[in-house]
Amino acid sequence: MRHSAVRYVITGVVSAAADFGLLYLLHEWLGLPVSVAAFIAVSTAFFLNFALNRVWSFRSTAPVAGQISRYFLLACVNWVLTTIMVGLFTWAGFYYLIAKAIALVVTTASNYLLYRLWVFADRRRHPLETTRS
């Protein structure tokens, strides 16, 4: 778990588990309407993912305001790209869940690079300084 890529994957799994678990808890146990439960669950997972990636995966100490803005912008781009990719792959004959899985792999791989180089980058460090990620 010394490399940021491993921590990034673990953070994704934890965030997804929180999303699904909270959805189940809020809807099945507490009786909230599924749409309300889904909104709360995905919102919580969104901020949990941001916090874990910032603090643990990429160990960033840069100002939060810029990072959350970049994180939200990237999330919006991912939602659009996922929708486009699933539509295109389904149109090309792929089963929709396979199309979604392909989109997930593409966005997960590209997000790691974008998180590391753009979202959670600490621009206060000297450009030639290396850190162990």
Image (cartoon, helix red, strand yellow):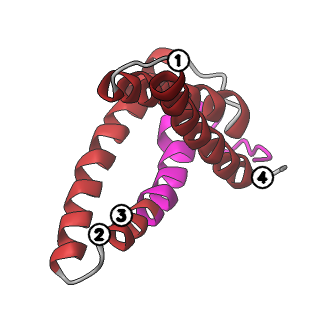
What separation in Å lies between label 3 and label 1 (alpha carbons)? Answer: 31 Å
Dot 4: element: loop
Identified by mark 4, the residue type is: His
Nearest the eye: 97 or 32: 32
What separation in Å lies between label 2 and label 4 (alpha carbons)? Answer: 33 Å
Which residue is disc 2 drawn over?
Answer: 96
Q: Nearer the viewer, mark 4 or mark 3?
A: 3
Contact? badges 3 and 2 (CB < 8 Å) = yes
Q: Quadrant of residue 71?
A: top left
Please state the extent of the stretch shown in magenta in the rendering: 105-133
Which residue reaches farthest left? 91
Nearest the eye: 84 or 20: 20
Which residue is disc 3 drawn over?
Answer: 100
Which residue is disc 1 drawn over?
Answer: 64
Contact? badges 2 and 4 (CB < 8 Å) = no
Q: Residue at x 32, y 34 (%)?
A: 73
Contact? badges 4 and 3 (CB < 8 Å) = no
Identified by mark 1, the residue type is: Val
Dot 2: element: helix
Nearest the eye: 127 or 15: 15
Q: Nearer the viewer, mark 3 or mark 2?
A: 2
What separation in Å lies between label 2 and label 1 (alpha carbons)? Answer: 36 Å
Where 19 falls versus 40 (above or below)? Answer: below
